[in-house]
Image: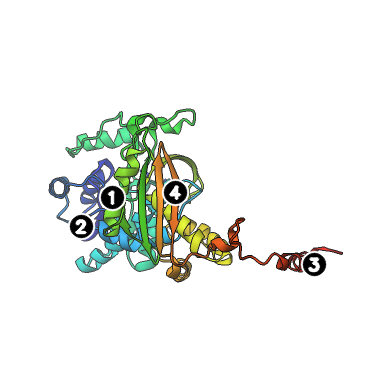
Amino acid sequence: MEKIVLAYSGGLDTSCVVTYLKDKGFDVVCFSANLGSEFEPADLKQRALQTGASKIYVKDLREEFANKYILIALKANSIYEDKYVLSTALGRPLIAKYLVDIAKKEGAKYVGHGCSAKGNDQVRIDVTVKLLNPKLHIVAPLREWELTSRESEIEYAKQKKIPIQATKEKIYSIDKNIWGVSIEAGILEDLNNEPKEDAYIFTKSLKEAPDKPQYVEIDFVVGVPVKINGKQKPFLEIIEELNTLGGRHAVGRTDLIEDRTVGIKSREVYEAPAAWILIKAHQELESLVLDKDTLSFKKCIELKYSQLIYQGLWFSPLKLSLDAFIEKTQSKVTGKITLKLYKGNIVVSKRNSSNALYKKELATYGVDDKFDRTDAKGFINIFSMPYIK
Ligand code: ARG
């Protein structure tokens, strides 16, 4: 019997996949990671074994996810196509890395997942597995089997006595972790439909958001958020607190027509309160402490970096080299940013850093001006020289 390590969520797809692989003669070892979704380890264990797995690894990876994956994405202000903070995309290389590690430990030659043939997640997991261990074989039953629709999967589950909670009318496909929620399918496939309020998990609607703004203070040390409202906290806790705070003020919803790696345009709705608040704060601090060349060059790098994350190229040589650039740029990114959360908006209120390159005595139009006005004319003469015939 060949052993396979399967990325397992306990949902409809992966539940069917366990049974399917068992029927194909595999010894199925499941692996479930908690990245911040609703997660019941005991429940997962029971379901996996009941559907045919011989063993299951259940790991709470929220801290590793925050500190090793989200943090550098934040330092790079990572946003895909202006609206997606890459929450789902950031989790996949981590899951794939564990698949590879567990396969090694278990002496398995196969790894598997329940990603569909149209999505980005199959690309992210497969590419990561290939980069980390090219000898492993990857099995993705959803790319091959005859169960092409949700309805046929539910029929299969019934026939095989797989316990499922899903109903045929399930409206959305949702992927949730601490960095955000991705919501797609169902009524969102029609571009004339606004998402209904019940699609959202983290955020209140604009209407329900309080009429009073809330201020939030974030302290960074070399690019790392270390305090919220003056209290020292681990990064993971800062994220969780900001999801609650931002969610209450309807912050961080986006609706995007997105270019998938496989070439399809899709419509996805996202909510990511903590991610947007932290990225905004981080950008504000960078604009205060970084010189203009580093800032503008970093913008170009950020665009590429976000695309690499989106495409699942987390462990690629270019991504790893850009990590070094991003880290290097953070040495001065220490200071405090105060933001105002109000009715879906994130508004900067105060900026403070001992590394600030802003000099009031140069910027001012008041009496304590230290700028030497006589320098300006000569500067402009030379600055315009290349353009004058
Ligand atoms: N489109 C997003 C991405 O490629 C999310 C994918 C998963 N979304 C979902 N609703 N199941 O990263």
- Answer above or below: position of 212 versus 10: above
Q: Callout 4: few (<14), some (14-19), or many (20+) C-alpha neighbours within 10 Å?
A: few
Please say whether residue 320 is visible from this viewpoint. Answer: no
Q: In this figure, which residue is indicated by the disc labeled 3?
A: 385
Q: Which of the labelled discs sits on residue 240, or is there none?
A: 1
Of circles 2 and 4, which is in front? Answer: 4
Q: In this figure, which residue is indicated by the disc labeled 4?
A: 349
Secondary structure state at the residue bearing disc 1: helix
- Contact between marks 2 and 3 (CB within 8 A): the answer is no
Secondary structure state at the residue bearing disc 4: strand
Q: Callout 2: few (<14), some (14-19), or many (20+) C-alpha neighbours within 10 Å?
A: few
Q: CA distance from mark 2 to mark 4?
A: 39 Å
Pick whichever of labels 4 and 1 is earlier in the sequence.
1
Q: In this figure, which residue is indicated by the disc labeled 2?
A: 59
Residue type at tag 3: Met
Pick whichever of labels 2 and 3 is earlier in the sequence.
2
Q: Residue 270's x, y, as percent?
A: 40, 42
Q: CA distance from mark 3 to mark 1?
A: 54 Å
Secondary structure state at the residue bearing disc 2: strand
Residue type at tag 1: Glu
Q: Is mark 1 within 8 Å of ligand 1?
A: no
Q: In the image, 100: left or right of 80?
A: left
Pick whichever of labels 2 and 4 is earlier in the sequence.
2
Pick whichever of labels 3 and 1 is earlier in the sequence.
1
Secondary structure state at the residue bearing disc 3: helix
Q: CA distance from mark 4 to mark 1?
A: 22 Å
Q: Which of the labelled discs sits on residue 313, or is there none?
A: none
- Contact between marks 4 and 1 (CB within 8 A): the answer is no
Of circles 1 and 2, which is in front? Answer: 1
Residue type at tag 4: Ser
- Answer above or below: position of 194 versus 94: above
